[in-house]
Image: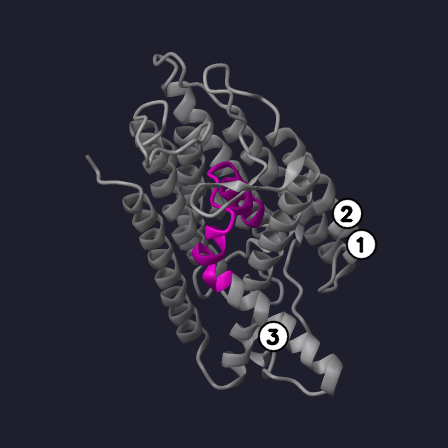
Amino acid sequence: MISVLVAAMTALVVSLLGTPAVVKLFRRQGYGQEIREDGPASHATKRGTPTMGGTVIIVATCMGYLVAHVLALRNPGRGPTASGLLVLGLMVGLGLVGFLDDFIKIRKQRSLGLTALAKFGGQLITGVGFAVLALQFKNRTTGLTPASTHLSFVRDYAGISLGTVGFVVFAYLVVTGTSNAVNLTDGLDGLATGTSVMVLASYVIIAFWQFGNACTRHATANCYQVRDPLDVALVAAAAMGACFGFLWWNASPAKIFMGDTGSLALGGLFAGIAIVTRTELLLVVIGGLFVVETLSVIIQVGFFKLTRKRVFNMAPIHHHFELAGWVENTVIVRFWIIAGLAVAFALGLFYAEFLSHGSLG
């Protein structure tokens, strides 16, 4: 538990103190955000605000993870694990894709960066690479790999196996869908960052609970067959601390934006954690706000193609409410409330499933 707290606090301090330095550096280099021309008029004042702040979140998360493990060297068997490193690798890989997207936007002074093909190509390489590696690295004692080929909600469904190829395709879809969902949500100051804090907090709880009730510790009917739950909790805690620190500067009026660098990285991190904790389908509930934002875009685009009419004033849906007259801060806080309710409901489902397999005793 101490290592989890150390990871969170280290990442928090690095992000909180490091972000202002990055803001100054990016301002000096002219790394400013470009704004959609068809967006709300109130967003015009945000043009030129430093972007690519996701680099701070990624660095702070890795620093938190590293420091926690350095301080835990006295405890044998508590070093970095395959699950933790793979999830971090997925985060960094998608962060690199987002960084290239942001950098092209800045260089070409436009709101579009990588082409859709190039962006999906980067997600394909990173997501498939993660999925293939996640089926390797069997634990010597349990034989468990970081990921499982079975479909999972709170734990593996024993009778529903996707097979190796099916799992790789499924994992790619989860990684791509989640990273793009966070990217779509990152349209208002602090909206995606604050929501990410809640999602990561839920995964700290879930992974730590799995660690305390792992089948290697307590062979009961409701134990969890997960390879490295404690290390995954540590990664989630580090990322949560990093997002907390970044939110201080990203809250309205934002001094810096995370950009695609941060949104793709965080989305990939959520997907990776869900896969290694065997909670892929539960992620749909945990990230309920991200799902709503994504569905609003799908509905808007699909309905417009069919009827040449729009369902919303603008998509993603947070812009719809802005154009309907809601003040930006009102939209952000109310959407945070929705995100918090989704996370609370998901944790309730997780715990109820645990109890359904037997009593705490």
Residue 157: horizontal and vertical position, in percent? 49, 42
* Residue type at the position of mark 2: Gly
**Callout 3: SS:** loop
Residue 74 disc label: none
Residue at the (39%, 26%) spot, across then down: 68
| Above or below, 176 relative to 92 | below
Mark 1 and mark 2 residues within 8 Å of each other at the beta carbon: yes
* Mark 3 lies on residue: 315
* Residue type at the position of mark 3: Ala
* Mark 2 lies on residue: 121
Q: Is residue 328 left or right of residue 114?
A: left
Write down the region rendered in magenta: 266-290
The answer to whether residue 99 shows anywhere in this view is no
Say which of 25 and 144 sits in front. Answer: 144
Mark 3 and mark 2 residues within 8 Å of each other at the beta carbon: no
The magenta stretch spans residue 359: no
* Mark 1 lies on residue: 117
